[in-house]
Image: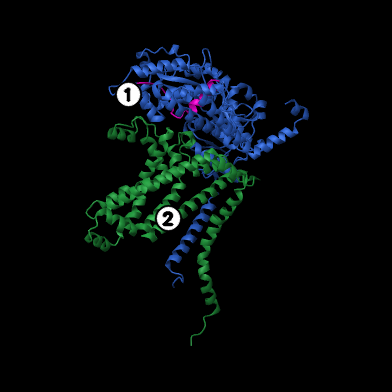
Amino acid sequence: MRSAPPLATWTRARLAPYAFLLPYFLITAVFFLYPLIYATVLAFYQTDGPTRRMFVGLGNFKFILTDADFHKALWNTTVFTLCSIFIQLPLSLALAMLLNAKSDRLKGLFRLIIFAPNLVGQVFVGIVFTMLFTPKYGLFNKLLQSLIGWGLEQNWLFDPQLVMPAIVIASLWLYVGFNMIYFLAALQNVDQTLVEAARIDGAGPISIFLNVTMPAIAPVTTFVVVTSTINSFQLFELPFTLLQNSNNGYGPDNSGLTIVGYLYRFAFENGDLGSASAVGWLLTCIIFIASLVQIRIASRVGREQ
Amino acid sequence: MEFPYGRAALGIAVLTVLSAAALLASRERGPAVVVAGVPVASAKKPDLVFATFTKEHAAAYHAALPAFEAKHNCTVQIQVVDPRALQSRLQSAMQVGADVPDMVELQDGFLSYFIKGPLENVHMVDLTDRLRSSGIYDKVVVNRFSKWSRGGRVFALPHDVHPAMLAYRKDLVEQLGIDVNKLTTWEEFARVGRDIVQKHRNPDGSPMHYMIDLPADGENIIIMLGLQHGTGMFDADGNVTFDDEAYVDVICWYVKQIQGPTRTSFPAGWGQNLAKAMIDGLVLFYVCPDWRTMQFEMDVPKLKGKLALMPLPAWTPGGRRTSTWGATGLAFPKGGVSHNFDLAWELAVYLYFDEKQLGPRFLQTNILPPLTTAWSQPEFSAIDDFWGVSLGKTFVPLAKDVPPAPTNAFHFVAASKINKAFTKASEHYAAHGESGLRDVARRELHECAEEVRTAMRRNVFIQRELDRTQSTRPAATRVAE
């Protein structure tokens, strides 16, 4: 018969897991839970910095939802998000498929080159592209002119019609490689026996891609779409640095203003943390709904397949 | 002996202990001094901390500091911080009660971030009484206080006047047969510009020269031109004023210069791009306040002797021939890290209003100081090698005509809305030409001004202050209104 462990050992064994979890809970409570609750409270106040505040009820939400600048920010962010999903991700997938080709001996090098822009971050890319987009002298403008005979004098960062394309182009350079890595990992896990079986059955490349590859990488695609949507809705540094010389960082007629830019303007330019918190909550709701819709659609498509 | 929870946990525990020990050890060598998020470099705490956003100013002050430090037996530390970083760090430090510098130089418009609450809650020291009692107020170009005041109270010392002129490629302008003496109004300037752009073409059909460098979004230049035409974004009482006919004139003139068949301008931008455009002769004229003259001296020495200055064309014949673009102000955050406002004030007076300092500094920076009594110093008559004229004698006669540019807490909101109105007018011109342009500009300016007024009314703190002021005024005064 085994004897019972001493009380001290038993207590230590019971408490040890909690002790290990304690740092996580502490950090979560201090840096996540408390700010979350505080931001919820603040959303109902107008503030002049963190020390002075006045209760305004739903006033912040009412103002924001009827503010033309918020509508503009919401529109800009949505357009950018759609571009991310429908331009950036297909491009990432196409690059991943190219790099997944077995015959390419320089695969590793290309993978590094395409991924490398992601290492430098949004601020760096923003500053570099302000120079690339310069009318007459910018490299990008010169490249366009030599390729298609148009674009030398285009003022990408000061023409409201061209600001969003400029942001999308800069973000493509930044993020295509990042998402490509996910797709590449997924493609490398596609069951090759299924591909071979489909080929034997007479399926062509397009049919194989649609009926074998796509279903196999569907979970990763869902993940990439959802994270891209969330990141796109949180866009801020890239347009803010890209447009640093135009309308205080928001572009002509606020054509580069994003929801987080709108939040930043309230919090750090106007000192109104209350309104900024309200914007933060609205953004949370938007992201939550968008993500939920995407996951639902993905799971429905998955069931049908 | 083995650590009961494994090597990983042991590694984390060791790292924690070592980090804590390192932190404690560094504290023993003296407390780290961090002012507005910027660690103070020297181990010894300085007697005064002075933050500025430009290394040119810092270099000029560094040269003058030893005499001040010797006289007052103190040490002064100058920090150079990027203007946006300076504003956001200072704002954050003030909000959470962290240490702030004793003195801080603010860029044009940045005071607005600090004056959003009631006057008594403005985080900068009110300098009005000290300025008046010291007599400095009467010696300074009085319009320059408007950029640094709210409700008649001054919160920063003006560093400059920044009269605006046009700089141009003298050699090319003469070659092209342009008589600058006849460019007395903006309409005439645009007419000559159209001729130049249309007549002189490259083999590929593109213009060989553009008359002037103008930013495509217009922002700073439109505000400058509005001031020249007699209207600021706000009046001295803080009311929004940009929805008037002067701004309509400016916007309608401007949109015609940047696009379509009437285009005369090229958006050369800043720094190397503008320098390249001037060297190539792509751009003939550019707007040049005093501070920009030094930028060209430094960046493009090969243009020495090829550039000249002329007054701005006026909006109406015989009208104002200058305006102002940019400003720097020296403010004193309340509760500065050294808690020695008197010493900080002494340093400010020494750097900003000591005539012996200002002459040599003008040679270093080309920036005209606002202290009128300093302009008789010999340095203000000296011939500048690069420009071939006395910059002091060129800018001083314009200084008295520099318009006031009142600011308020909604400076950047208003600037953004002007940008919006301009963009809408510009889009209308691109689609429909001149037909209906004035009506569109007028309507957009009015709508944008209303948006600024709505934002101002929404500020419950300022509204409460206004209500309190109204209710405490004598009833007779209120009835009279």
Q: Is residue B368 visible to the viewer in this orientation of the structure?
A: no
Q: Residue furthest bottom?
A: A1
Identify the residue at image location x=36%, y=51%.
Answer: A179
Q: Quadrant of residue A134?
A: top left
Q: Chain of mark 2?
A: A
Q: Which chain is blue?
A: B
Image: magenta residue range: B209-229
Give the left or right position of residue A296, taking residue B46 as reference. Answer: left
- Residue B312 appearing in the image: yes
Chain A tint as drawn: green
In the image, A49 versus A253, the foreground residue is A253
Q: Is residue A2 left or right of residue A109?
A: right
Percent across and percent down for residue B451 are 57, 34
- Against A235, residue B60 (above or below) is above
State the mark number for residue A297: 2
Q: Secondary structure at mark 1?
A: loop
Q: Which residue is identified by label 1?
A: B206
Front residue of this view, candidates A246 and A169 = A169
10 Å crowding of disc 1: few (<14), some (14-19), many (20+): few
